[in-house]
């Protein structure tokens, strides 16, 4: 089943957080909205599988900081 997790980070927050998440139709809507707004989409199914279990609005757990930081740096540099 298709999954999507949208992550947001701003410097005034202590950590990135789950902005939106979903499976199936909701995942497709999240991806469509990202595409329409020129937001980078990365295909990382293992990470999505882990993050989909976290409630929307929650900060990313510390064990994911390194990978999320690498993703945010990569996207920033595009």
Image: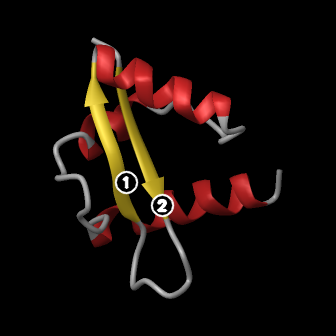
User: Does residue 66 sit above or below 42 in this rendering?
Assistant: below
Is 76 in front, or is 21? 21
Q: Is residue 66 above or below residue 14?
A: above
Quarter of the view holding residue 60:
bottom left
Label 2 residue SS: strand
CB atoms at circles 1 and 2 under 8 Å apart? yes
Counting residues from the start of the chain, the first of labels 1 and 2 encountered is 2
Where disc 1 sits, the SS reads strand
Quarter holding the N terminus is top left
Q: CA distance from mark 1 to mark 2?
A: 6 Å
- Count of numbered labels shown in the rendering: 2
Where does residue 20 sit, x and y in percent of width and height? 34, 45
* Residue found 27% across the figure and 31% down from its top: 22
Q: Which dot marks residue 19?
A: 1
Q: How is the image coloured?
A: secondary structure
Residue at left 54%, top 75%? Answer: 10
Residue 68 on image: x %, y %:
49, 59
**Left or right: 14, with 21 as reference point:** right
Mark 2 Cα within 10 Å, few/some/many (few <14, many 20+)?
A: some
Q: Which mark is residue 8?
A: 2
Task: Give the residue at x 17% y 53%.
Answer: 55
Give the farthest residue toward the right: 78
Camera-side residue: 26 or 53?
26
């Amino acid at each position: 089943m298709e999954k999507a997790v949208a992550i947001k980070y701003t410097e005034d927050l202590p950590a990135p957080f789950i902005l939106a998440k979903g499976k199936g139709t909701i995942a497709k809507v999240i991806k469509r909205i990202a595409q329409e707004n020129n937001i980078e989409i990365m295909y990382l199914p293992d990470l999505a599988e882990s993050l989909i279990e976290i409630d929307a609005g929650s900060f990313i757990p510390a064990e994911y900081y390194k990978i999320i930081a690498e993703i945010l740096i990569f996207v920033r540099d595009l």
